[in-house]
Image (cartoon, grey):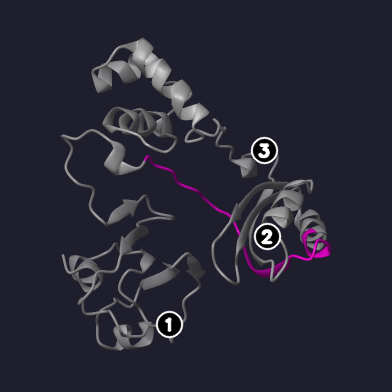
Amino acid sequence: MPGGIDAIDEQILYYLAQEARHTSAPDIAEQVDVSAPTVRNRIRQLEEDGIIQGYHAHIDYEKVEGRLVNHYVCSTGDRDREELARRALEISGVVNVREILSGRGDLRIKVVGTDTDDLTRIAQDLISLGIEIDDEDLGYREYFRPYAPFGPRDEEPISPVSGVAGLTGDANVVELIVEEETPIVGTTLQEANEEGLLTSDLLVVRINRNGESISPTGETTIQAGDFVTVHSRSGISEETLSAFTGQ
């Protein structure tokens, strides 16, 4: 039955998501402890079932003659979202379109332009389709990893806190999930600073909540379940982590 996968399929998907180009069926077979022909048959079935929908190169367009990458949060209103998504993908410069099951912000569109004038042209083409652009930001870095629960069963569970290499100097960026009943839940960022929950050099740069991306201000209230990106030049202290995660 399409969509029904077992533990072997899960591990095959894990290793393909980790690095599909340099991972062969024998490589996966060695990790999963099955034969290479079994892996090939499983991959073929996953493709036929539509679980594996393609193999795409992860391209850093900004390293190609200085291209600019922009991300648009768009709304389609009462128009046909699927049709508008397909038409948006036909615009020169649009490289990715995602449909989101929400009211506003139900399309997320990634575009590549040669300069700001080119980005403006792409935005105007999107608007001409009847798509409303709610928000936009220039892309900087994008990170991928395979879905951890599909990975090796003998590994320790992944912590909800993940450090990312610094932006400049001793800078540090951490992405974390806000747990329930932690000190910062229910407080605004301004209140959290006043109460000493956040250090003076720490900045909350992004909050993802219920599929929406929020650019926080001092009046933004932290909620349990928020996926928060924080940045600090001096590093993230254990006290700060505890305020968000209770750990």
Separation of marks 2 and 3 at Cα, in angstroms: 31 Å
Image coordinates for residue 54, horizontal then vertical, percent: 55, 32
Q: Is residue 172 above or below residue 213?
A: above
Residue 78 in sight in this render: yes
Q: Quadrant of the C terminus?
A: bottom left
Please give the residue where the numbered disc 3 appears in the rendered image: 64
Residue shown at 42% from the left, 16% from the top: 40
- Of circles 1 and 2, the one toward us is 2
Foreground of the two, 227 or 130: 130
Q: Is residue 194 above or below residue 141?
A: below
Q: Residues within 10 Å of mark 2 (few under 14, many from 20)?
A: some
Q: Which residues are magenta?
A: 126-146
Foreground of the two, 205 or 30: 30
CB contact under 8 Å: marks 3 and 1: no
- Of circles 2 and 3, the one toward us is 2
Residue 24 in sight in this render: no
Disc 1 or 2, which lies upstream in sequence? 2
Q: Quadrant of the N terminus?
A: top left
Disc 3 or 1, which lies upstream in sequence? 3
Q: Residues within 10 Å of mark 1 (few under 14, many from 20)?
A: some
Picture quadrant of residue 139: bottom right
Separation of marks 1 and 2 at Cα, in angstroms: 30 Å
Specify the label residue 81 is tagged with: 2
Q: Is residue 104 left or right of residue 158?
A: right
Image coordinates for residue 219, horizontal then vertical, percent: 43, 87
Residue shown at 31% from the left, 61% from the top: 176
Please give the residue where the numbered disc 1 appears in the rendered image: 220
Q: Residue furthest front?
A: 1
Image coordinates for residue 192, horizontal then vertical, percent: 30, 83
Identified by mark 1, the residue type is: Thr
